[in-house]
Amino acid sequence: MGDPKRNRKQYVTPVRPWDRARLEREVQLVVKYGLRNKKELWRFQNLLRKYRRVARDMLGKINLPGKEGEIARATIQAVIKKLYKLGILPENATLDDILSLSVENFLERRLQTVVFRQGLAKTIKQARQLIVHGHVEVDGRKVTCPSYIVSRDEESKVGLRVRQNA
């Protein structure tokens, strides 16, 4: 099971570290979404890879007769429901919608991006600073992690914290 104090990597480094086209795309995404480093980007790429792998596996099993086909259809519905709750997919999404996702869909759901898009911060970097310094709350709770995924329910509950006088 592993030691709970020892965290594991949640990202996979690129196979070709000096691929010019990939490096340029990554830099554009890091600047656009105000990421601290490329590890944050790789983490979301890994999350996308996980959902696409599940969708590809279920695509091969969805038309099978019997119990295996039913399990595949139930799994796909669960994944679609999860991604809908996170605000990544529309309500009546299909298996093809999961396969057509990009890393930008996940980066748009980060708390840092949501704070910037709602106009609570003037720049994407200021949004990160507000979050890290504890000035942003989600549903009444202080959240200090800029990469927090804001669900569809919580999107309207993101706001600046009211300062308590001591």
Image (spheres, rainbow, N blue to C red):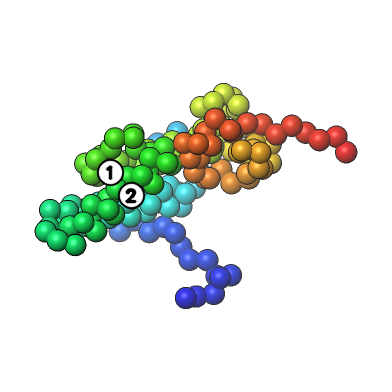
- Helix, strand, or loop for circle 2? helix
Q: How far from the left and from the top, in percent, is residue 128?
A: 59, 38
Q: Which mark is residue 98?
A: 1
Q: Which mark is residue 79?
A: 2
Q: How far from the left and from the top, in percent, is residue 126?
A: 61, 32
Residue 160 visible in the picture? yes
8 with respect to 127 (left or right): left
- Helix, strand, or loop for circle 1? helix
> Which residue occupies 61% across, 38% down?
139
103 with respect to 134 (left or right): left
Are the two marked residues, 1 and 2, in contact with CB atoms closer than 8 angstroms? Answer: yes
Q: Name the quadrant containing residue 22.
A: top left
> Which residue occupies 49% across, 43% down?
149
Nearer to me, 54 or 79: 79
Q: How far from the left and from the top, in percent, is residue 77?
A: 29, 48
Q: CA distance from mark 1 to mark 2?
A: 9 Å
Nearer mark to the viewer, of 1 and 2: 2
Q: Quadrant of the C terminus?
A: top right
Residue 25 visible in the picture? no
